[in-house]
Amino acid sequence: MNNKDIRRQVEQSLDSIRPYLLKDGGNVEVVEITDSGIVRVKFIGACETCPQSFMTFKTGIEESIKKDVPQIKSVEAMNLPA
């Protein structure tokens, strides 16, 4: 499977979560998918400063991507709020 197919699968996985993020004024975008199977995402909008972003990331985004796209080894958020 090529990188384009994997990216499409990752985006489809995120599309299942996006309505919840958009409802609160936020979103997430894929920054990079490495050849070694790491997805790097970035929170945008309200998600950039939301104190719940870590939970959203761990139990929503990371879990969903790893379940839907088994080729992905890990998911990293580039700008999780402290």
Image (cartoon, rainbow, N blue to C red):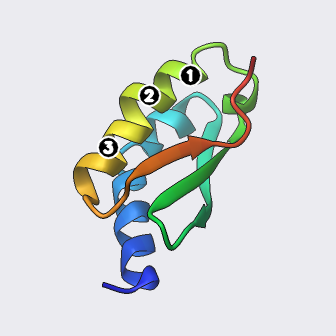
Q: Does residue 59 appear left or right of residue 33 in this picture? A: left
> Quick one: quadrant of the C terminus?
top right
Residue type at numbered disc 2: Lys
Q: Residue at x 49, y 46 (%)?
A: 75
Residue 21 image point, x, y percent = 52, 35
For badge 3, the amino acid type reads Ser
Which residue is identified by label 2?
A: 58
Give the Cα separation between the discs numbered 1 and 3: 14 Å
Q: Residues within 10 Å of mark 2 (few under 14, many from 20)?
A: some
Query: Which numbered circle lies on residue 34?
Result: none
The label shown at residue 54 is 1
Please say if the residues under marks 2 and 1 sit with CB atoms less than 8 Å apart.
Answer: yes
x and y, in percent, of residue 35 in the image: 50, 73
Quarter the N terminus occupies? bottom left
Q: Mark 1 belongs to which amino acid?
A: Phe
Residue 70 rendering spot, x and y as whole percentages: 25, 58
Give the secondary structure at mark 2.
Answer: helix
Q: Is residue 71 left or right of residue 80?
A: left
Q: Is residue 16 above or below residue 35?
A: above
Tag 1, which secondary structure? helix
The quarter holding residue 76 reads top right
From this view, report whether residue 2 is shown above or below residue 43.
Answer: below
- Nearest the viewer among 20 and 56 is 56
Tell me the crowding category of disc 3: few under 14, some 14 to 19, or many 20 or more residues within 10 angstroms, Cα based.
Answer: some
The earlier-in-sequence mark between 2 and 3 is 2
**Residue matched to label 3:** 64
Which numbered disc, 1 or 3, marks the residue that appears first in the sequence? 1
Name the image quarter holding residue 48. Answer: top right
User: Viewer-proximal residue, 23 or 3?
Assistant: 3
Identify the element where label 3 is drawn.
Answer: helix
Kindly indicate whether the residue at mark 3 contacts the one at mark 2 (C-beta within 8 angstroms): no
